[in-house]
Image (spheres, rainbow, N blue to C red):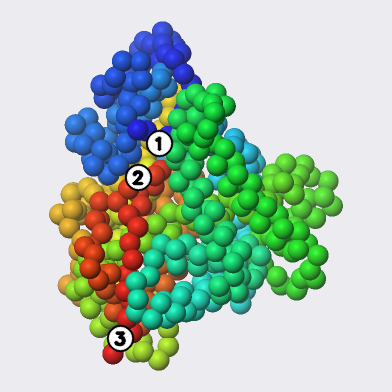
Amino acid sequence: MISLPVTTTGGAIQNKMSKNSSAKILPPREPGSFLVGNYDFKPTIPTYLELWRKHGDLITLVTFGQTMIVVCGHKTLTEVLEQNGENTYEHPFVFGFREYFECSGILGAFGQVWKKQRKFVIDTLRKIDSGSANQESHVADVVEDFLKDVELANGQPIEMKKVINTNHCNIIFSLLFGEKFEHGDETLSRLAGLVEEAGYAVSDSGVLSFFEWLKYLPGDLFKAKRLRYLVDEIKKVVKESADKHKEKTHDADATDFIYSFMQEQERMTQAGEDMEGFTDRDMILFGFGFLFGGIPVTHALAWSFLYLVHHPDVVSNMQKEIDNIIGKNRLPTMEDRPSLPYCQAVIYEVLRMASVSSGAPAHVLSADIEVNGYTLPKDAWLIPGLSTINWDPSIHTEPEKFNPGRFINDEGQLFGYEKVYTSFFIGPRTCLGQSLAMIEMFLIITSVVQKYDIGNEPGNPLVSLEGIYKGVHIPSPYNLCLKNRL
């Protein structure tokens, strides 16, 4: 079932296009069912690849009258999302954005508010990285907590997703408020659980974008009530933390996001500027968006350790590289990154194979655009098939094979990995957390591999690498045994 929420029902859009756009040629259409059209479309890697091979870079789907264009291939995705970015950067105004983000925050904002908030994030990240408490330091502090969790398991099976979610949530909290939760804090554990469940619930509630009235039915079949509860609880934690933050005396060089947000509020007030996008309500939604926006990173880390337990030879190669360059007496840092090309290649290969953002959020066309001889009409949805780049055999030989060596040349240097960064999207909506995600993945993965051998839970088969699709591509739950290296 399609996980992309749509607001239009019936045949209104399709009929309007056929009446008013007779000279326009839409991309080839994938046949659908009577009335519901392509509602059974699943945004999976195999589905994108099948449609791509069958129809080419552009495919038309119609679901309950809403026209959607699936966009595949690096060249065409770049043309549509980057070169035509001014006409394709907006998200549709649908159930998830109204209920979840209230059309604010870095993920839910539209138009000028989104542009103002995005500029604020970019400026604040620069300010953070220019100070002593840069992004790496926030991650490094939490890496120690991650290793404590592993150590406490004492070689017994450990639920990797739970450890990853909790510590990632702490990294985001640290960036937002300038301080992290103490290791083992119950509020942190609860917050991480709320964020994870909310990610699943928003996917399950997608049908409400077609028929919002369904949320009023008895029970909670489409998770609308549960989603509302989860969202409110997460916002409550953010608000309580923000209120405490306001009462603190801050250092002049404090650079955390919430303090920077308050500074921007003060500047705008003194300048008499319109506060749209920077009210106290927006501050809470901003923090909420940061927590929610990090969900794909947790899945990428979970995929990383699952791929590693499937490929012990890769782990061995990583350990040899780390031992030769760093040794065992200190943890890896980002300064070590250029000297660890194989470890970097492993991370790129995980991002490529897993294609976590296979079901990337839909965009909407604000004007007609012409691409590859076809018209992509205004108000149509764009479904980015990012995984077609990662699985393109003309870019990556034998893409179905997990092979970090594809990114290492004969001189032992990294090469050919640049297109993997499209996993963080293309164009104006490129993920602002890309640099943080890469720091987090590098420091956590190399630190764990340096200290531990990675083994499967005894008595259980290895968990499949097929995964599950819940808006994003996630691995099935699994436990690992991480034992100290001799």
Q: CA distance from mark 2 to mark 3?
A: 35 Å
Mark 3: few, some, or many residues within 10 Å (few <14, many ≥20)?
A: few
Residue 202 drawn at (x, y percent): 49, 41
Q: Secondary structure at mark 3?
A: loop
Q: Secondary structure at mark 2?
A: strand
Q: Which mark is residue 485?
A: 3
Q: Which mark is residue 469?
A: 2
Q: Nearer the viewer, residue 321 or 20?
A: 321
Mark 1: few, some, or many residues within 10 Å (few <14, many ≥20)?
A: many
Q: Which label's residue is closer to the chain start, 2 or 3? A: 2
Residue 44 drawn at (x, y percent): 30, 42
Q: Which residue is mark 1?
A: 3
Q: CA distance from mark 3 to mark 1?
A: 43 Å
Residue 167, above or below 243 = below
Determine the image quadrant of residue 29.
top left
Q: Which label's residue is closer to the chain start, 3 or 1? A: 1
Residue 4 drawn at (x, y percent): 42, 34
**Is residue 403 at all visible to an observer of this figure?**
yes
- CB atoms of marks 2 and 1 within 8 Å: yes
Residue 290, above or below 91 = below
Q: CA distance from mark 2 to mark 1?
A: 9 Å
Question: Looking at the image, which residue is at 50% across and 38% down?
Answer: 223
Determine the image quadrant of residue 302.
bottom left
- CB atoms of marks 2 and 3 within 8 Å: no
Q: Nearer the viewer, residue 342 or 371?
A: 342
**In the image, what residue type sits under mark 2?**
Tyr
Residue 208, above or below 20 = below
